[in-house]
């Protein structure tokens, strides 16, 4: 009985490791995780560090030089911020279709950094107090 | 190998092709025209974190990213 138990332990360990591997594999291959990975690949090192710490990153508009803060999310997640980092205006524009947050954020970054005026021309403005920092800081 | 990355509901779909292969390159160019014709924006990385939009197919680009047309939210 003891020998069976001893033989069983490594098998259980292997099974546990296999389960963990599956869990990680499928967990990291969800659309959401893929979107976050793509976003991370295309951010600058400074933006990536900011995003990992705060779940948002800043971009500079290509036309005005204004700073925008892109929060993790798929709607109403872009804020124009002043030098003190305080939101002064919200801008809502998103890629059409049902995309995951990472994809939406990457499209917003590219739009603001390469054609700010066009992005803002189609965006809807909203008061920046609509969402609290708590709202944006929910875990992934 | 070069890659065209198309954002979609699954996160993204990647199309890899050999830029040295004329037939594969022609397919990639056709895909570029189809996607941009549908309103997708195409962009390439020029440096870490630096992105440039492209309006015509770049056969030398290692990665080209496509995202759907933007709309007001």
Image: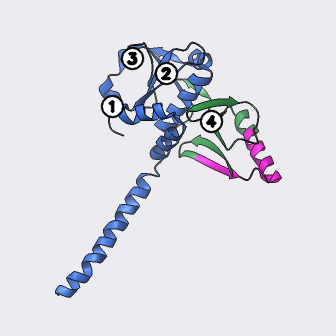
Chain colours: A blue, B green
Letter of the chain that mark 2 sits on in the rendering: A
Of residues A17 and B12, the one nearer the viewer is: A17
Given the image, what chain letter belongs to the residue carrying mark 3?
Answer: A
Give the Cα distance between marks 4 and 3: 27 Å
Q: Are marks 3 and 1 on the same chain?
A: yes
Q: Which residue is mark 2?
A: A92
SS assignment at label 2 = strand
Residue A106 against residue A80 in the figure, above or below? below
Please give the range of residues in magenta. B13-32
What is the chain letter for disc 1?
Answer: A
Q: Does A100 appear in magenta?
A: no
Crowdedness of circle 4 by 10 Å Cα count: few (<14), some, many (20+)?
A: some
Tag 1: Cα neighbours inside 10 Å, few (<14), some, or many (≥20)? few
Q: Which residue is mark 3?
A: A85
Residue A87 in the image, given as x and y percentages of width and height: 40, 15
Place of residue A105 in the rendered image (x, y in percent of width and height, measured from the top left)? 50, 31
Q: Nearer the viewer, residue A85 or A109?
A: A85
* Residue A46 location (% of width, % of height): 46, 31
The disc label shown at residue B45, or none: 4
Identify the image quadrant of residue B21.
bottom right
């Amino acid at each position: 009985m003891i020998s069976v138990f001893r033989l069983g332990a490594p098998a259980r360990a292997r099974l546990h490791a296999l389960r963990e591997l599956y869990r990680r594999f499928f967990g990291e291959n969800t659309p959401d995780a893929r979107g976050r990975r793509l976003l991370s690949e295309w951010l600058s090192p400074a933006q990536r560090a900011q995003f990992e710490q705060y779940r948002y990153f800043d971009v500079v508009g290509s036309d005005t030089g204004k700073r925008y803060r892109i929060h993790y999310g798929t709607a109403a997640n872009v804020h124009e911020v002043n030098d003190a980092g305080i939101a002064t205006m919200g801008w809502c524009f998103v890629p059409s279709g049902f995309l995951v947050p990472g994809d939406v954020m990457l499209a917003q970054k590219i739009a603001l950094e390469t054609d700010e005026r066009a992005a803002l021309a189609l965006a809807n403005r909203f008061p920046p107090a609509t969402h609290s920092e708590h709202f944006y800081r929910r875990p992934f | 190998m070069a890659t065209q990355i198309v954002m979609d509901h699954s996160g993204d779909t990647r199309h890899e092709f050999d830029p040295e292969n004329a037939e594969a390159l022609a397919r990639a160019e056709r895909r570029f025209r189809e996607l941009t014709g549908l309103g997708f924006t195409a962009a390439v990385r020029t440096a870490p974190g630096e992105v440039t939009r492209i309006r015509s197919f770049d056969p030398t680009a290692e990665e080209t990213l496509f995202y759907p047309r933007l709309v007001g939210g």
